[in-house]
């Protein structure tokens, strides 16, 4: 995947379309109306940007456009994770993990799961 840069607002649009492929702009607007106070024009602008970035494709049915993802959600999450890791931790996974482990309150189950995963990686 060619390092696709998706803004936070565009992520909101993509989440809706990943969950409801082949939906219309109106359906995206309806799905987001309780979460975001965006005008319909804002949603349509974000959709257009995602089409321009080749993150979304569309098919026209009469006067209606149905949008579908051209990128997999998992691929975008991986790319965003790599970007975050590089920006915030200079690419050091170890430093990021240490920061989260030291700052977050982990349950006994969390610690056991992390230990199991690390043991499997050895």
Image (cartoon, grey):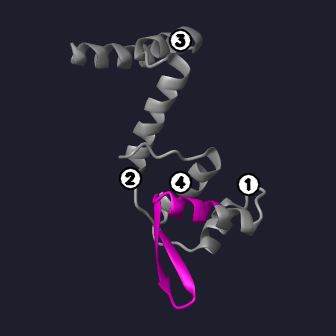
Residue 41 position (above or below residue 77)? below
Marks 3 and 1, Cα distance to the nearest angstrom? Answer: 31 Å
Marks 2 and 3, Cα distance to the nearest angstrom? Answer: 29 Å
Marks 1 and 4, Cα distance to the nearest angstrom? Answer: 13 Å
Marks 3 and 2: in contact by CB < 8 Å? no
Marks 4 and 1: in contact by CB < 8 Å? no
Marks 3 and 4, Cα distance to the nearest angstrom? Answer: 28 Å
Question: Residue 81, labelled with which disc?
Answer: none
For marks 1 and 2, the one nearer the N-term is 1
Question: Residue 36, labelled with which disc?
Answer: 1
Residue 53 position in % (x across, y down): 50, 57
Question: Residue 99, labelled with which disc?
Answer: 3
For marks 3 and 4, the one nearer the N-term is 4
Residue occupied by mark 2: 72
Instruction: Give left or right: position of 78 versus 120.
Output: right
Residue occupied by mark 4: 15
For marks 2 and 3, the one nearer the N-term is 2
Q: Quadrant of residue 120?
A: top left
Marks 2 and 4, Cα distance to the nearest angstrom? Answer: 11 Å
């Amino acid at each position: 995947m060619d390092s696709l840069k998706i803004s936070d607002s565009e992520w909101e649009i993509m989440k809706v379309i990943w969950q409801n492929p082949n939906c219309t702009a109106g359906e995206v607007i309806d799905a987001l109306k309780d979460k975001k106070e965006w005008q319909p024009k804002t949603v349509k602008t974000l959709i257009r940007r995602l089409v321009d970035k080749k993150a979304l494709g569309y098919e026209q049915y009469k006067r209606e456009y149905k949008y579908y993802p051209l990128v997999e959600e998992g691929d975008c999450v991986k790319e965003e994770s790599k970007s975050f890791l590089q920006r915030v931790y200079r690419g050091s996974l170890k430093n990021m993990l240490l920061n989260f482990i030291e700052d977050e309150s982990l349950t006994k189950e969390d610690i056991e799961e992390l230990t199991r995963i690390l043991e499997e990686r050895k």
